[in-house]
Amino acid sequence: MKSGVSIPVFLISLLIAVPVHAVSVRTSTVEELAFFVEQSAPAKVINYDHSLLSAQIEGRVLEVAVRVGDQVAEGQTLVRLECSDYEYIRTQASSAVAALDARLQLARQQLKRAEKLLKQRNASQELRDQRRAELSALQAERRSAEAAVSNAKLKVSRCKIKAPFAGTVTERPAMLGSLASVGTPLVKVLSGTQPEVSSQVPAAMLASLQQASVLYLQSDKISYPLEVRVQLPLVNSSTRTREVRLNFTDQAALTGASGRIVWRSRGVQIPAQYAVKRNDVLGLMIWQQGVVQFLPLPNALEGQALQVDLPAEAQVIIEGQHGVQNGDRVERLEPADAATTAE
């Protein structure tokens, strides 16, 4: 009598014939999945050297040698004021110095004579002291006269308003024949030196800006490459922003232009949908020669893009990643196979 359960031979053959398939996954390269995170902040182009030149003396405008838009060189005369009164004062001051020089020469001779007579006991010490005092007074008077000459020369030099630097005339309020008083605006000149960009950046974004791999000003649909010059150590209490100054590294935008600075963080980002969690750590499943490798990303946050530092050709598992474990052998579906499976 036979005991136990007998299994038909044909069933055994069927079990043996059923093949055991490896788990199939679909992959994509980092290059295909990656995207870059861009951030931006409002910005404007400024130039410190945009000077409004005003009259420093009173005088009638005799000549305006430039027009708006003219290119000027450093030291070039832009406006000329009537100067006859100041030239007359300069001549008077120079004449006063010449007269004092003559009196000084006489005073020195008189002092020398008084000292000689005192040695010969033919003059009193009081006379010698008097001659010394007269000489000292004349010397002080001459210093005052020299100061008057310098002041007169300075005023004469101010009859010509000259460009403090090379640049472009942007305004010309001076009118021929008008009377200019001290402080009257005459010409405004914009320096030809390269401007810079000013931007108010939220404090939380400064770290990514400092480490940006790409940085540019976007203005009127044109991009201008930039580099950070300085972050001012001052936080705006109302907006919680800090001012950042940036230099153009190539072509510069025009002074006064506005737009946004745009920067791209270093490294690449992978969409959060491809993340898996193993042992409470987020990461990615990487396919490498038929074997699954778990790449932990300790700084990753759920629901946020994953920042990775992987070769562009690395294969990330994008389908089936939740059903595999580190070290599993898997079969990778080719694009055609993946399309068939999807159907």
Image (cartoon, rainbow, N blue to C red):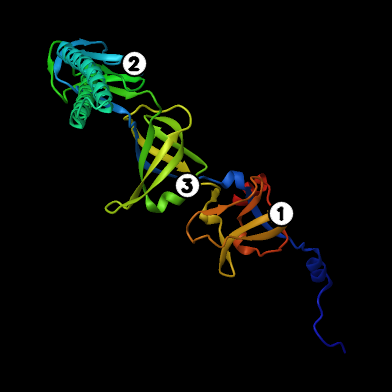
Query: Dot 1: few (<14), some (14–19), or many (≥20) neighbours within 10 Å?
Result: some
Q: Is residue 156 left or right of residue 295?
A: left
Q: Label 1: which residue?
A: 288
Lateral position of residue 157 relative to residue 289, left or right: left
Q: Earlier in the sequence, mark 1 or mark 3?
A: 3
How packed mark 3 is, by other alpha carbons closer than 10 Å (few <14, some 14-19, many 20 or more), is: some
Q: Which residue is mark 2?
A: 72
Where residue 325 appears, x then y in whole percent? 66, 65
- Contact between labelled residues 2 and 1, with CB atoms less than 8 Å apart: no
Instruction: Name the one closer to the observer, 194 or 77.
Output: 77
Does dot 2 land on a helix, a strand or a loop?
strand
Give me the residue at 78% from left, 68% from top.
15
Residue 159 visible in the shown view: no
Question: In the rendered view, would you say 283 is above or below 143?
Answer: below
Q: How many marks?
A: 3
* Mark 1 vs mark 2, CA separation in Å: 67 Å
Q: Give the mark toward the camera: 1 or 3.
A: 3
Task: Tell me which amino acid carries mark 2.
Answer: Val
Q: Is residue 330 above or below residue 12?
A: above
Q: Residue at x 68, y 60 (%)?
A: 293
Q: Which mark is residue 211?
A: none
From the image, tell me which residue sits under label 3: 210
Q: Residue furthest bottom?
A: 1
Camera-side mark, 2 or 3: 2
Give the amino acid at mark 3: Gln
Q: Quadrant of residue 190?
A: top left
Q: What amino acid is found at the position of numbered circle 1 in the picture?
A: Gln
Which comes before the other along the chain, label 2 or label 3? 2
